[in-house]
Image (spheres, grey):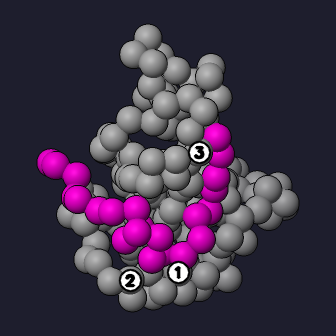
Amino acid sequence: MKPPKLSAEQIRELGEPIYRTTIPASWADTNGHVNVRWYAVLYDDAGDVLHDMHGLTLELHRARNSGTMDLEHHTHFVSEVMPGESVAVYVRALEVNAKRLHYLMFVVNESKNRLSSIFECINAFVDLNFRKTAPWPVASFALMEDMIEAHSKVGWPVPPTTMSV
């Protein structure tokens, strides 16, 4: 499936990015651009911020012996990012059910003002006592619903997705 044609300006309608960084030289591969493995690091670090936004902090997880886990994800690579360039990660929450959250993340190359990558994910809350998915904490679920509602008001439709909760 081809990724949608979205501009950096459209993505910025989602509000402030949840994560920003400048790409270190060590992330370059033999082609001179960011190696695919580092996109996983970008999205994982941004995911930690997303969970904190929903109250799913390290302290909460330690107290409950819980965590979150990706069940499925897909990445589109749209344009290159080079070492030294600045990137920002934006999130668009799509749907949530009792145990799963479906969202998109977008890496915008701020140095070139263009979309670099799109990440689609199904993430779940996990009870680590049983190593099984479990219902989201009530307050976290409410925050996810609020985010979905806010993101439904941006001026562009949800890109075609390959997953559902």
Q: Please give the name of the residue rendered at 45% of the width and 48% of the height, measured from the top-left corner.
A: 112
For disc 1, the marked residue is: 147
For disc 3, the marked residue is: 86
Q: In this view, which residue lies farthest toward the left?
A: 1
Mark 1, secondary structure of its residue: helix
Give 113 or 163, whichever is nearer the viewer.
Answer: 113
Nearer the camera: disc 3 or disc 2: 3
Where is residue 67, by image quadrant?
A: bottom right
Q: Please give the name of the residue rendered at 38% of the width and 52% of the height, measured from the top-left corner.
A: 115
Q: Earlier in the sequence, mark 1 or mark 2?
A: 1
Distance CA(mark 3)–CA(mark 1): 26 Å
The magenta segment = 1-22
Distance CA(mark 1)–CA(mark 2): 12 Å
Q: Compared to 66, does 11 lie above or below? A: below
Q: Earlier in the sequence, mark 3 or mark 1?
A: 3
Q: Is residue 13 shown to the viewer in this render? A: yes
Q: Please give the name of the residue rendered at 48% of the width and 75% of the height, measured from the top-left corner.
A: 14
Q: Is residue 90 left or right of residue 7?
A: right
Q: Position of residue 62 (x, y in %)?
A: 82, 55
Under mark 1, the amino acid is Met
